[in-house]
Amino acid sequence: MSISVPCYGIIPARYASSRLPGKPLVDIGGHPMFWHVYERARQCDSLKRVIVATDDTRILEAAKRWEVPCVMTRADHASGTDRTFEAARLLGVEEDAVIVNIQGDEPLLDPAMVNQLVAPFEDDSTAVSTLAMPIIPERATDPNQVKVVTAVNGNALYFSRAPIPFDRDGSMPDAFFGHIGMYAFRMTALARFVSLPQSPLEKKEKLEQLRFLENGISIRVVMTDHCSRGVDTPEDLEAVRALLSGQ
């Protein structure tokens, strides 16, 4: 799949991690984790280019060894979104470009997810897009699993760590949608995001996407059947190693 708007994939790769230090460099089947993410992302024919954005010379040197395009960014960014914006500027992308923020801890990334993510940008009104999928009620109670509710046009109404929507009467089938933390942005929307201060709900929920909604920037939510598995803990890492070794 390809679209008429130029699209770029940027993989933020930060060395520091409270639960898994040096996470982008952990070995999975003889390659560092960021290499797996890059190899999968570059299979997306909707992306004009894919690059890693890091704040650490160890990751930069490893990228050179594995022949993965990489740029060095500032170390004081508050989020991966800010790092993504700096990397896009360093790349000199077109002003009308779409930037895909690809999580650096998703070595099982399905390339089809990226294609789904950028498809809405054929509509000029789309500023930001993200992914979601149905989840079971038990998972919806986990605050680490972010939930989203949408309007009839597919735009996000709200994201929360709480199980939303709340069915007061218990008269409807359980229907929860789990947010998948991949985003695509038009450069104009990304530039506005980084210029805005943290918003009240963003601070409350610890969810940076709420900054867009609180400032009137719509987010198109694309429902997907594809799923991935991020690596946040040593247990996640072992599970991913096992899954990749079986492929």
Image: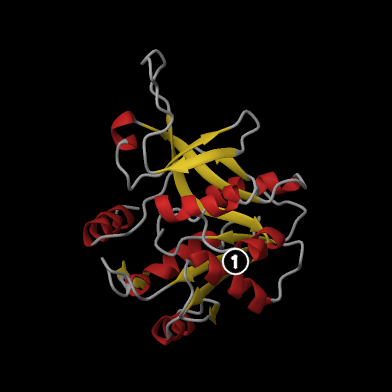
In front: 20, or 127? 127
Q: Secondary structure at mark 1?
A: helix
Residue at (61% x, 61% y) in the render: 193
What residue occupies the far top of the structure in this picture?
A: 171
**Residue 175 to residue 34: above or below:** above
In front: 173, or 214? 214
Q: Quadrant of residue 147?
A: top left
Q: Is residue 111 visible?
A: no
Residue at (57% x, 52% y) in the render: 114
Colour mapping used in the image: secondary structure
Residue holding disc 1: 194
Indicate the amino acid at tag 1.
Answer: Val
Q: Is residue 73 visible?
A: yes
Residue at (35% x, 53% y) in the render: 247
What residue occupies the far front of the structure in this picture?
A: 200
Q: Is residue 139 left or right of residue 90?
A: left
Residue at (52% x, 44% y) in the render: 131
Count the labels in the image. Answer: 1
Q: Is residue 41 left or right of residue 49?
A: left
Residue 141: x and y, percent?
30, 36
Residue 78: x and y, percent?
47, 70
Residue 205: x and y, percent?
41, 50
